[in-house]
Image (tube, rainbow, N blue to C red):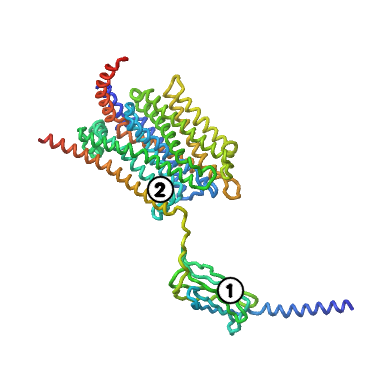
Amino acid sequence: MDSLTRKRYVERAVWPIGRGDRNFWISVGVLSAMVAAGLFAWIYQLVNGLGVTGLNQKVSWGFYIINCVFFIGISYGGAMTSAILRLTNAKWRAPLTRIAEATAVAALVVGAVYPIIDLGRPDRFLTIPLYAQFGSPIIWDVVAISTYIVASFVFLYLPLVPDVAVASAALGGRSRFLAPIYRILSLGWRGTPAQERALKRGIGIMAILIIPLAVSVHSVLALLFAVTARGGWHSTIFAPLFVLAAMLSGVAAVILVVTALRKVYGLQEFITARHFRYLSYLLVALGIGYLYFMISEYVTEGYLLDASTTPVLEAIFTGAYAPAFWAFSIGGLVFPLVLAVAPGRFPIARAGVASMLVVAGMWLKRFLIVVPGMAEPIMPWDWGRYSPTWVEVTITIGSAAAIPLILVVFFRFFPVMSVHEMDEVEGAEEQARPQLQIAYAGGGDD
Amino acid sequence: MTRAMGGTIVVAVAALMLAFGNVALADHLKAICDVRATASAKLDQGYLLAVRLHTSDGKPVNETAVRFYQLVDFFGKREMYLGTATTDGQGNAALTFLPPTLGHVEIVARSGARDHFTAAEGRTTFEAAVAAPAYEAETVPLSGFTKVVTGAVGTIVLAVWALIAFALISTARGVRRGARDLAQGDHA
């Protein structure tokens, strides 16, 4: 990267910082209104009780648990994308890692709130640590999610340290209020070799740690279902299935966010079709893996036809939930994967549309896991029914809007692309180039 | 002849109804319930909750069901049903009771209204010196192994927290030290 390109890169990376144009305020206003509507619905629920939701005695898990699994899954994909790209030292990662890490934290914060919303009375959350039952997955769920939240914040913060100085310079003297905060956050970064070494070690530890942590979070979430004696839930493949589903939906969400921010912040020069092609490959690899796991699960259960599982399978394949299942399988999984890798024009638009379909499809899949499993009677009763009310729908929309709101606000203060990482990657490439040339020169074939 | 017999029966029935009606209409006799608790001869059998149900003039009230309760504190004061015994010809009824815990015990005995006797209630308290053995849950299969696994997972969680703290703190210290060294170099 020549100095002119680097200058343009830095300009685009810090472009949103302190920029409060009309579009920014309109987007913040609209998203804030949606979040406020969600908060209003939650307060309404707090005042009037869980009776205002569609949850009932038979189907006591609904939108809230679906959203919890879904949003935490998205965060997992964001963290994994960044960690894998760092650990494999992918040269093209620099413009993407910051967006992936920020998406991970935003989605995680939103997803972690849902168990509290689902409780109905948030004060009862204290019951879990106060009367902890270590034999129950619930307590481990709390432990895993809280650990993962802390780790995700640290994983976002450490690579940000050198860029805080860049952000501070971009803001200049425009904000006296932010200058001391930037000074504290940058830890006195000057880019000395000793500082580089310390930072590299810290990021390396976190990149390695975040992967098993994210796996543990989604495995424990899966265990909440799998250790319950309900049809369609007590499956040995649930933990890896949940992990893969999280990665798939997370990578799709990252592609969506990258597509949107690329357009909004004018990053087209640096986030190119190549990045989308690589991310699409990752999406397709994960999608094929998920398809394999899902088929494996259904074939095993369908062949055995256990008394508790059969009604759920019937409901999903041919019964009341069949439209949702086939919409997910074809429209949310097979078609988007084909769309993402098919050769042809508009690779970025196709990756964006495919990701949107995958994200929607994975939400439907979580619905198909939670609701039919709950609705199926385990006593000689009728099937349960679940229809979400305006409260659940409004909270869901509000929380979904909270993710772009957090990202838009975050990138108003911090560079949208990692400048330090780009320098690092480019520096490594510059160092590696002469050696490669020598190697090729002696290779003979070329 | 038949008509004369019929008239006699009607008169007899009317006389009987009048007689029993008088009984039914009479005031209810007040029943009194005396309760006492005595330790059983065999200590491990607990206590004998004995009741004597009688009228105010001392006549026994027999064939009456007496329900025994213990006053307990379970999300507020409430009565825990212990059992029922029926009074004999002397108005006595008894129930063997092994308290669940040691210490102060308060017993309530209660009989319902029956025939011309009113409902009655009696109370007694005593200090239990013997109690039922504490409930011991059956050992769950693999419970020993589960405890080890729980401990191991807990240790791993603590190690992960320590590693996160190390990554953050060591990076912060390293970066700060680098800044300090640079500042000292500038001064020099």
In terms of image quadrants, where is residue A183? top left
Q: Is residue A284 visible to us here?
A: yes
How many angstroms separate mark 2 from mark 1 (CA)? Answer: 50 Å
- Residue at figure coordinates x 71%, y 78% from the top left: B21
- Residue at figure coordinates x 46%, y 22% from the top left: A342
Label 1 neighbour load within 10 Å: few <14, some 14-19, many 20+: many
Amino acid type assigned to the residue bearing label 2 in the image: Trp
- The residue where tag 1 is placed is B85
On screen, residue A232 versus residue A261, left or right, reads: right
Task: Measuring from the top left, give residue B107's x and y in whole percent.
Answer: 50, 73
- The residue where tag 2 is placed is A140
Amino acid type assigned to the residue bearing label 1 in the image: Ala
Label 2: element kind? helix
How many dots with numbers?
A: 2
**From this viewpoint, which residue is outermost toward the bottom?**
B57
Label 2 neighbour load within 10 Å: few <14, some 14-19, many 20+: many
Label 1: element kind? strand
A8 relative to A364, above or below: above
**Which chain does the numbered disc 2 sit on?**
A
B84 relative to A141, above or below: below
Task: Measuring from the top left, give residue B32's x and y in whole percent.
Answer: 56, 79
Q: Which of A428 and A407 is in front in this view?
A: A428
Task: Measuring from the top left, give residue B81's x and y in whole percent.
Answer: 54, 68
Task: Measuring from the top left, give residue B108's x and y in whole percent.
Answer: 52, 73
In terms of image quadrants, where is residue A205? top left
